[in-house]
Image (cartoon, rainbow, N blue to C red):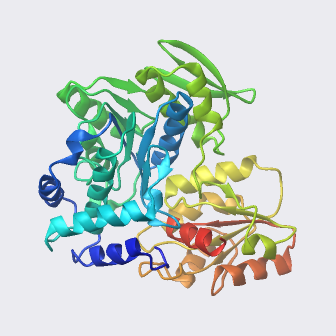
Amino acid sequence: MTTTSSPSDQILARMMALHPKIIDLTLDRVWRLLAALDNPQDSLPPVIHIAGTNGKGSTQSMIRAGLEGWGKSVHAYTSPHLARFHERIRLAGELISEEHLSEILDECYAKNGGENITYFEITTVAGLLAFARTQADYTLLEVGLGGRLDATNVIAPELSIITPISIDHEQFLGDTLTKIAGEKAGIIKRGVPVVVGPQPDEAMAVIEATAERLGAPVLAYGQHWHVSQERGRLIYQDESGLLDLPLPALLGAHQIQNAGAALAALRHLGADEAACEAAMTNATWPARMQRLKSGPLVAAAAGAELWLDGGHNAAAGIALAAVLAELPERPTHLICGMLNTKDVTGYLRPLAAQAQSLTAISIPDEVNTLPADATRDAAVSVDLPATTATDTATALRQILTLDPSARVLICGSLYLAGHILRENG
């Protein structure tokens, strides 16, 4: 996803060639490389492991803000990156440096000895190695895909978290919520508490059965903790009492539920009320309904509002439509690019009621992009007027020619969001 050629980029390019598939879910290769590196996963600061379909990154960002507001130093691992790979590995609060990243990637590449291993697997091991060698109070690990066979699932966590589960990545995780929930619940460990966000009944049944089998205490939304929005405040309650907090800095009604999971985690860890408030006010997460305020695209869109969001499945489309409905009324036009593995119609259907038009583009430099024509046709099928453009800048010009004061939302994929963040400086 990067376009520069730093030393780390060159090593990452070599790593891409170590396995014929981008995704090949198994833990055998990860365990082999970890053993060659003297098992760094056994030397991590206490781990909070986060799985789910939607909200993993936002929940992680709020937990990190809360822990840091509590005076703790925090490692954080997330994927995919948007503009630079370094975003995936945060060491004690700071993005990993180019020198340090190149060093650990080189070490992992050498220890792997040319054996088959996927890009995500070897880079996850690199992250774990960096975390083990850097002092911190906590480690936040976001699952890449699924949970049971994800490369992050090699740790002994202090706490597990499962955010809302919905249909996504069916080709890898299964075509029913029950199957997908089984994969996500694979992060639950024997005796380790698990915070569970709002779930469909069939997903919750799988999670509860897995937790019961493993003797893992469950801290579930609607049972052990409750969260709501009341009169412009966030109200959280659990058996320890009630919190009256500012609304999350991250926009959208769905962030209330993510905030609840973050607060449940923080309270379980013993964080104070000031830490919980910091989780609400200090969290940032790029490309989650992010208002772009500077850069070439913004300059070209003078008089318009420019927003960016990386959500890409049906549940994300529902959440995004709800956010748009809450914003001050203004003509809204979408610039959309999606991957060919996604449910484009399911994503666009809820957005059709909130937008005046969609301009479809192909995601630049992405082999798995859905062609712009296909995105346009999907939009038309849900009664959203649509056209195509060759790139984002052209799409923006087309929209602003017709509506100079529009709200323009660039959306549909984290890969597109990353391209925009790089191009917009």
Pick whichever, 361 or 124, lies toward us: 124
Pick whichever, 172 or 111, lies toward us: 111
Vertical arrangement, residue 316 with respect to residue 218, above or below: below
Question: Where, by quadrant of the figure, is residue 276 drawn?
Answer: top right
Instruction: Say whether residue 222 is left or right of residue 176.
Output: right
Q: Position of residue 179 (x, y in %)?
A: 27, 49
Q: Where is residue 150 in the image (x, y as percent from the top left)?
A: 26, 53
Give the residue at x 21% y 74%: 19
Q: Position of residue 242 (x, y in %)?
A: 58, 15
Give the residue at x 59% y 58%: 287
Instruction: Say whether residue 86 is left or right of residue 19.
Output: right
Vertical arrangement, residue 31 with respect to residue 135, above or below: below
Question: Where, by quadrant of the figure, is residue 419 drawn?
Answer: bottom right
One can see residue 106 in this view: yes
Pick whichever, 186 or 285, lies toward us: 285
Give the residue at x 24% y 64%: 107
Vertical arrangement, residue 121 with respect to residue 367, above or below: above
- Farthest bottom residue? 390
Vertical arrangement, residue 71 with respect to residue 387, above or below: above
Instruction: Say whether residue 394 is left or right of residue 342.
Output: right
